[in-house]
Image (cartoon, helix red, strand yellow):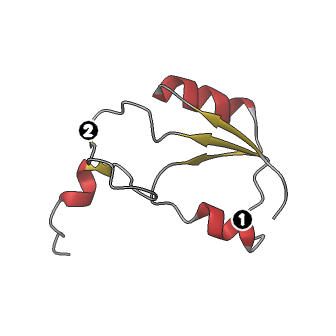
Amino acid sequence: MQSFTYERATSAQQAAAAVAARPDAKFISGGTNLLDLMKLEIERPAHLVDTAGCPLIGSRRRQKAGFGSAPRSATAILPPTRG
């Protein structure tokens, strides 16, 4: 895995600006497999922008249960649709 820089965004606007400013940046939040892909060198971002702390519209937060706890989006709790 190659080295990378890390930034924690405090707002959606800050996160978007940080990724827009660097073409080699990726968003990261709880529940992502990006780090696994980085270990396998499938993904090679030079900069990560953590959005887990951003107060995004429509998101819900669970009480933290320890390492790996992540907020669940409102869409994650919707029942599946029939196609």
What residue is drawn where x is 75% and y is 52%? 45
Q: Nearer the viewer, residue 38 or 23?
A: 38
Image coordinates of residue 71 in percent, x first then y, are: 34, 49
Which badge, 1 or 2, is on the more N-terminal residue? 1
Q: Which residue is mark 1?
A: 38
What residue is drawn where x is 55% and y is 30%? 9
Q: Taking 34 as reference, is 83 above or below it?
A: below
Image coordinates of residue 40 in percent, x first then y, are: 74, 74
What residue is drawn where x is 81% and y is 65%? 1
Is residue 54 shown left or right of residue 39?
left
Q: Given the image, on which type of amino acid does mark 1 rest?
A: Met
Q: In terms of secondary structure, where does tag 1 sit?
A: helix
Mark 2 neighbour density, 10 Å: few (under 14) some (14–19) many (20 or more)? few
How many numbered tags mark residues here? 2
Q: In terms of secondary structure, where does tag 2 sit?
A: loop
Residue furthest to the right? 2
Q: Which mark is residue 73?
A: none
The picture quadrant where one finds residue 61 is: top left
Q: Which residue is mark 2?
A: 58
> Which quadrant of the figure contains the C terminus?
bottom left
